[in-house]
Image: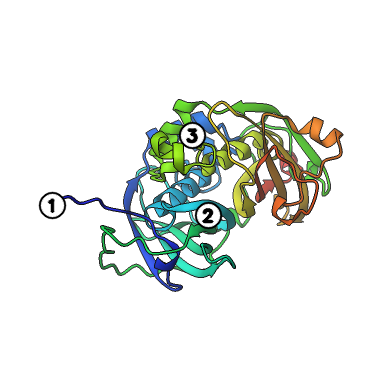
Amino acid sequence: MIHEPRYGRLLDDFVPGDVYAHPWDVTVDEGMLALFAASFQDAVPTYASRAAARALGLRDRPVHPHLLLDLGLSLSVHDVSERAIAHLAYIDARFPEACYPGDTVRASSKVIAVKPVSAGDKGVVHVRTQLVTDSGALVCSFERKALIRAGHVGGDRPRDPPHDVVQLDADPPRAPSVLLGELPPLSRRGGFAWFWEDLQVGDVIVHAVGRTVSEAEHMQLTTLMRNSHPLHVDEHYCRTGSFTKTRVVYGGLVLSWVLALSSRDTAGNAVWDLGLDDGAHPSGVLAGDTLYAVSKVLAREPLGPQAGSVTLRVVGLKNTPARPLLDRGLDLFTPELGKTEGKVAEKVVEITRTLLVRRREEEKR
């Protein structure tokens, strides 16, 4: 007997309220952290330095929240989006507790809504995915929307095994509690220059250095994250199944690269990611493309004498730095989906990032 197992779901396979327990269990080790740090070079000291993390009251250097987001997105592909046409939106990503090297994480997704489009050949599926450790700590929670073709998978799609997964609080905290109180003094001098006071509402920050995506790197990182969508890993499939006729770089990696490109100028004195929201990928990225980033400060709020929140709109562009586009008067910060004119063809990701950032007065303590 020949079997041909099929994974993922088509639109009519989704039922609001259903919870899928994704089968992967992944132990996040120091090697994974080192590879992620080498590939993305994010400037937040909490994620890069054991000394900085312990000085804040964490027991060790935590797993980078963007690595957890990439894992959560990828682990959910098996049940949610392996047959998706496109990933449409990132919504309300939070990182309530720290995850540490040696922790084993597993993911589940709950179907929030299913909405067919008027043509009837596809629809939008809205899910909430949560990543928990083997000790039960909720370390990443986010919602997303995907565009899915109509129909049922049928055939040899394996039946879901019985499970007792119940998703946790739908409104989790935005950071570990130890980081939301009084912060200790800076553990070193001579770090990055930008503090909370330096990020003024309305400021636009052009991040000058670009990042070229190599084929070997994006393939290795995609499989490291356990992403099984053939759009990212199967060249033969992509000859007919991809809008580009070749493999498209996994969007979670594009997001992580763009946020890292922006981090020296915005996050070098950040303590934690308080959230990501209102995110999308207006166009795809291929191996050989060069990524650039630009940020706009949307809001600030003091959170005590040592820190405050900063909300940024971060935009990623391909093959063109931001400054020439700004000089031409292009609107880089309005979401592409809401535009009737003036679309920016170079835009590959856009998202709102909120950070907990140290105040400059911290230097005087």
What x and y, as percent, mark residue 39? 51, 30
Please tell me how crowded label 2 is: few (under 14), some (14-19), or many (20+) other residues with Cα within 10 Å. Answer: many
Q: Is residue 158 above or below residue 43?
A: below
Which residue is painted at 48% across and 43% down in the image? 67
- Mark 2 vs 1: CB contact within 8 A: no
On the image, the x and y values in percent for residue 333 come to 76, 47
Query: Which class describes the residues within 10 Å of circle 3: few (<14), some (14-19), or many (20+)?
Result: many
Residue at position x 80%, y 41% from top? 204
How many residues crowd mark 1 within 10 Å: few (<14), some (14–19), many (20+)?
few
Secondary structure at numbered mark 3: loop
Residue 47 visible, this angle: yes
SS at mark 2? Answer: loop
Disc 3 from disc 2: Cα separation:
33 Å
Residue at left 60%, top 39%? 44
Residue lying at 38% horizontally and 45% vertically, measured from the top left: 228
Q: Label 2, on which residue?
A: 95
Q: Amino acid at mark 1?
A: Met
Tell me the CA gap for discs 1 and 3. 33 Å
Q: Quadrant of residue 234?
A: top left
Q: Amino acid at mark 3?
A: Thr
The residue carrying mark 3 is 246
